[in-house]
Image: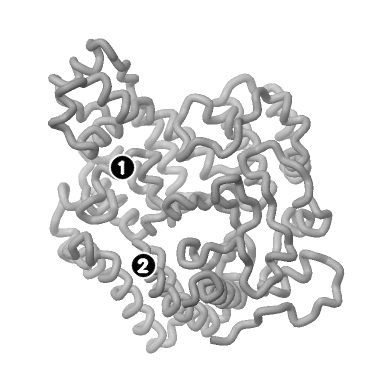
Amino acid sequence: MSGSSTPKSLSSDSWSERLAQRYQCIFSPALIHWFDAEIWQRHGCGEYCRAVDPTLLLSDAPEPIWPGLMSCDLIPLIGNTSGDWLCVRVDEDSKASEVVQWYHGGGDWIPWGRDIAQAIVFDGLIERISADSRRHAIPAIVPRSNEHEEQDDELLNWAFGHMPDGLVESLKTAGDSEQVAACLLNAQVSEVAIHCELILKALCHADVKSLQLAIGLDVESLGRNELTEWVFDISRIPEKHRQQIVSGKHAVELVEQNWDSAALHAKAVTLLAPQLAWGWDILGYCEERSGNTALAVDAYSKAARCSVFTDQSVRFNTHWATDDASKFSIERMRQLDESTIEKSEYLSTVSKAGNGDRRTAVTDYWKQRAVMHLAADEASEAYECSMAAGWDLGAGPITVYGEILELAHKTATQSGQRARAELAATHRRCLNDRYGI
């Protein structure tokens, strides 16, 4: 497999120019400044505080890349202390068009902003936004104790300099988490991540451990999926167990969920980032709860076409309905309209395969589609299929990613997506360097 492994010329002293040449990529003004002003050397107080030295990114096989686990359109920029990363994603026009949080525990990712400055602002303010909602994991560092420490955060202060006029002043007068979120949404900063937090606030008040404790001995007859289903939607709790939960020795208050608010934020996410499953999942379930079956199935069908790594299923408690089809959306379609699945080759492939064979079946499906698109001179579509082969349900074992990354490189090259081609080649070298594959 070809692919430039080193910059063609290192005559420039600019980090951004050398990296842009290395990855054949177009950086945003904030990212250019991040590298060239060496902001990456400054100290940050947020969870993501360990920036990658650009020297590492210039190497043939950068050590921070997790080949096979990270999709091959990502470049890691800042890590925390537990293996998670803020990564820049490269689009079809070879632009570094967004920054995503990538979670090493399952490979899930979620957009945190259009550039590195927005992601740092969100990281710096997340404790003010999500103080009473559930995070996907315990932060790797102790959160700042109060908002006054924001003034001492060198990374956050730099990022504020790249924000729209008026945002910093409006944040100073924001008194609660809702006002902080509103300030960022009004400024169009980290919108998807903010909507995610607001859905969590609207829905996620209970947890499985609390329900187990409240139910007591009777919990032995209940499966974890059943309890997770009740946490997801407390209206699904049978009356018998509801009384146990709210009135026993270890009673839990079942706070009313705001599904109307969740629907509004989910709808916004489907418009901002239709490639994310969780927006469609939540919207579909809101429609389902309202008795709008056709609208629910339509939303679920869109969610089903999104990568499982975009569903945030643990955070939203939708993983109670993923055992038999890997995706919440497909399981809900099974319950609402089985014919929708039968009419789709893809949905049938996912639905009919056994748990042990499903990833292989789906990977093969997408690889075959990629070959078909290449034969039809549709290289861009072939690239999307090659990415789905690796990161729709994930592929296993890790050895299969060698062929998948080579296919991604080939299809990106043929479609003229230079940055994506170089990144696929880079991830392929990382796979060989780390695993000998």
Q: Nearer the viewer, residue 247 or 384?
A: 247
Snapshot quadrant of residue 91: bottom right
Query: Is disc 1 placed on a helix, strand or loop?
Result: loop
Q: Which residue matches tag 2? A: 395
Q: Residues within 10 Å of mark 1 (few under 14, many from 20)?
A: many
Residue assigned mark 1 = 318
Residue 282 appears in the picture as rendered? yes
Q: Do the CB atoms of the residues marked 2 and 1 lie less than 8 Å apart? A: no
In this rendering, would 317 be left or right of 116?
left
Q: What's the residue at 36%, 56% (across, down)?
A: 308
Q: Earlier in the sequence, mark 2 or mark 1?
A: 1
Q: Quadrant of residue 7?
A: bottom right
Q: Could you tell me residue 367's position as x and y percent?
A: 35, 77
The dot on residue 11 is none
**Residue 208 sits in which quadrant?**
top left
**How is the protein colored in the picture?**
one colour
Residue 2 image point, x, y percent: 58, 86
Tell me residue 266's x, y (percent). Answer: 41, 41
- Is residue 420 among the parts visible in the rendering? no
Vertical comparison of 407 with 328: above or below: below
Residue at image coords 33%, 39%? 317
Left or right of 286: which side holds 315?
Answer: right
Q: Nearer the viewer, residue 404 or 278?
A: 404
